[in-house]
């Protein structure tokens, strides 16, 4: 997830003055920092399973009481699962890479390690979330499946999504949209498209916003 051109739309949504934000796949904290700058009274929970990146996150936000760093992955049920780490760490996933090789044709996406990481349900960690941002390299739907107790009250979900499978087992945009529609969250827009070498749209950031009563 890059660019965050969805941020103005997020800021235009109805949020409490002190929103609780989930940053799933927080990486080095770039998006977290932008969210905190835009919403300075927010409390942010950053989830990052890659140990090296989680340590960088903890160092970056050390002393900031608004931020809690969780060195775990988000999923549908508690477990320990293998994380496939690629030469581009931001593309690492709990799913095996498949079409991601087509998305970044000609680039080195070799597997550098397979690391067992803890997986938790989001609703087992938090009792409230107003905004959920997910950049989990295909694992967005399992993560949302582990947030069923939270989703009825969530105002906005921002999730990286794909137009063709980039990882084995990945849910595509229609399945993601249908799942969130069941919790009253409607697809509101698609941002930051990435086109592969053939010109096809491979992925983008989808924003889902809670229905407003008529």
Image: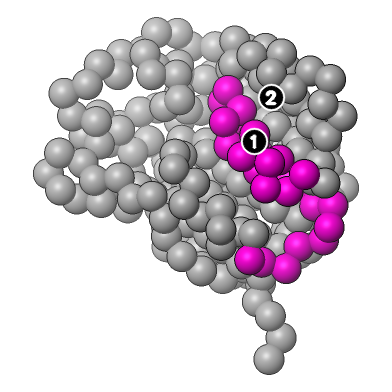
Residue lying at 61% horizontally and 59% vertically, measured from the top left: 10
Judge whether residue 143 can be spotted in this image.
Answer: no
Q: Is residue 101 shown above or below 145?
A: above
Looking at the picture, tell me which residue is in the foreground, 157 or 42: 42
Name the residue tied to disc 1. Answer: 32
Residue lying at 53% horizontally and 49% vertically, measured from the top left: 159
Q: Which residues are magenta?
A: 12-40
Q: Is residue 37 magenta?
A: yes
Where is residue 23? Give x, y as percent.
Answer: 65, 39
Name the residue tied to disc 2. Answer: 72
Q: Is residue 198 shown above or below 212?
A: above
Q: Tell which residue pokes out farthest to the bottom in this image.
A: 214
Where is residue 58? Give x, y as percent.
Answer: 73, 17
Residue lying at 59% horizontally and 16% vertically, measured from the top left: 53
What crowding class fits label 1: few (fewer than 14 Cα within 10 Å), some (14-19), or many (20 or more)? many
Looking at the picture, tell me which residue is in the foreground, 57 or 154: 57
Mark 2 or 1 closer to N-term?
1
Q: Is residue 171 shown above or below 110?
A: below
Q: Is residue 14 shown above or below 175?
A: below
Residue lying at 61% horizontally and 28% vertically, measured from the top left: 29
Q: Quadrant of residue 78?
A: top right
Q: Tell which residue pokes out farthest to the left in this image.
A: 198
Please give left or right for residue 17 compared with residue 205 in the image. right
Looking at the picture, tell me which residue is in the foreground, 212 or 152: 212
Where is residue 129? Give x, y as percent.
Answer: 78, 51
Please give left or right for residue 108 compared with residue 18 in the image. left
Q: Secondary structure at mark 1?
A: helix
Look at the image and tell me in which quarter the C terminus lies. bottom right
Q: Secondary structure at mark 2?
A: loop
Q: Which mark is residue 111?
A: none
């Amino acid at each position: 997830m890059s660019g965050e051109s969805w941020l103005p739309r997020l800021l235009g949504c109805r949020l409490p003055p002190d929103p609780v934000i989930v940053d799933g796949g927080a990486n080095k904290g770039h998006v977290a920092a932008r969210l905190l700058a835009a919403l300075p009274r927010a409390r942010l929970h950053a989830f990052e399973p890659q140990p090296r990146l989680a340590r960088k996150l903890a160092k970056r936000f050390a002393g900031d009481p608004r931020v809690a760093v969780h060195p775990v992955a988000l999923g549908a049920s508690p477990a320990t699962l293998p994380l496939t780490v690629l030469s581009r760490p931001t593309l690492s996933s709990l799913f095996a890479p498949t079409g991601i090789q087509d998305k970044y044709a000609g680039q080195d996406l070799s597997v550098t390690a397979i690391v067992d990481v803890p997986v938790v349900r989001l609703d087992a960690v938090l009792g409230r979330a107003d905004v959920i941002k997910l950049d989990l390299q295909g694992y967005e739907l399992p993560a949302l499946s582990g947030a069923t107790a939270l989703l009825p009250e969530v105002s906005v979900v921002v999730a990286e999504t794909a137009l063709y499978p980039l990882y084995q087992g990945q849910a595509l945009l229609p399945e993601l949209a249908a799942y969130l529609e069941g919790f009253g969250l409607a697809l509101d827009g698609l941002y930051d498209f990435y086109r592969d070498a053939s010109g096809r749209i491979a992925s983008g950031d989808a924003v889902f916003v809670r229905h407003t009563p008529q």
